[in-house]
Amino acid sequence: MKTQPVKYQKTKVEDLEIFYRESGPAEAPTVLLLHGFPTSSHMYRNLIPLLSEEYHVIAPDLPGFGFTDAPKNTDFTYTFDNLTKYIQGLIDQLGLKRFALQVFDYGAPVGYRLAVANPEKITGIISQNGNAYVEGLSEGWNPIQKYWAEPTEENRNNLRGFCDFGTTQWQYLSGVSDPTLVAPESYTLDQYFLDREGNVDIQLDLFKDYASNVALYPTFHDYFRKNQPAFLAAWGDKDPFFLPPGAEAFKRDLPNAKVKFFDTGHFALETHVNEIGSEILEFLATLPA
């Protein structure tokens, strides 16, 4: 297999510089990879080479994450609607007419919004621990849900620990049977960005706005039912945040969805990239051009 080079690109979308990784033949079918909290497109560093021999891969960093601009929360509105607006801008700027979506964690509500707005562009969806059903939310969400119900300063401050190094590392290692498979630069790089001045407040704003994603679940379900996109759920079944019932629930609205579980945690690509990559390639081969 010939390894395709990865280009590390930046482009201006409205007022922000959006960073993205690009690999694979430009004329090949496109796959758009959307990351989650608290990471960046770096989480796809091992998957991109597996896909890019046959596919054109685009993996952006969301506003506030990674190498994309992260203005202070006093200067920018950190909501999932707004994150989606900038990724939509990137899609339009790159002229992506048709693409498959791979979504994870925060990338899921962004990706599902994009699918609702651009149903004609979506060739298929891969969800790796990218939730869209209330039964997928674990008790780990309880402190965040309390902040949704009572957005007090005390409840906001109680969430600051989600941005600590110990929690970041725990997100990567929880549910992993062999921690030596998890590259330490993964959570170390994530923490570097979290520790930038003002970034914790960015994350707290997004914790609060995550309620808007749950409110949109019926809209996402309606999109699934009406459009019946080809769908693969590849799920780490020891995820402390998004439970296996959330993966199984896709079958309610997408009877032909394939749901595959892996014996690992939230960041399943850290430990099972070859297995998940094989499932994704098999799935992508079935999609229309």
Image: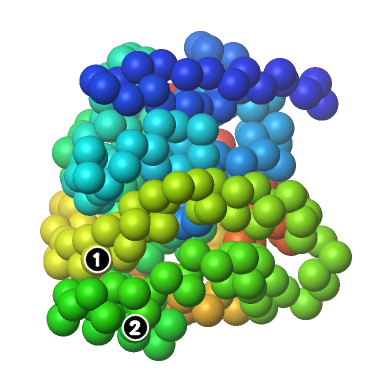
Residue on which the image places disc 2: 143
Judged from the image, the secondary structure of the residue bearing numbered disc 2 is helix
Residue 253 visible? The answer is no
The residue under the point 59% across, 21% down is 8
Give the answer, above or below, for where 223 lies relative to 32. below
- Mark 2 Cα-neighbour bin, 10 Å: few <14, some 14–19, many ≥20: few
**Residue 252 sits in which quadrant?**
bottom left
Q: Earlier in the sequence, mark 1 or mark 2?
A: 2
Q: Quadrant of the C terminus?
A: top left
- Mark 1 Cα-neighbour bin, 10 Å: few <14, some 14–19, many ≥20: some
Residue type (three-letter) at the residue carrying disc 1: Lys
Judged from the image, the secondary structure of the residue bearing numbered disc 1 is helix
Residue on which the image places disc 1: 208
The residues bearing labels 1 and 2 have C-alpha atoms spaced at a distance of 11 Å
For the residue pair 76 and 11, the one nearer the viewer reads as 76
x then y, percent, for residue 284 = 53, 39
x then y, percent, for residue 26 = 53, 13
x then y, percent, for residue 7 = 62, 18
Residue at the far front: name it.
Answer: 197
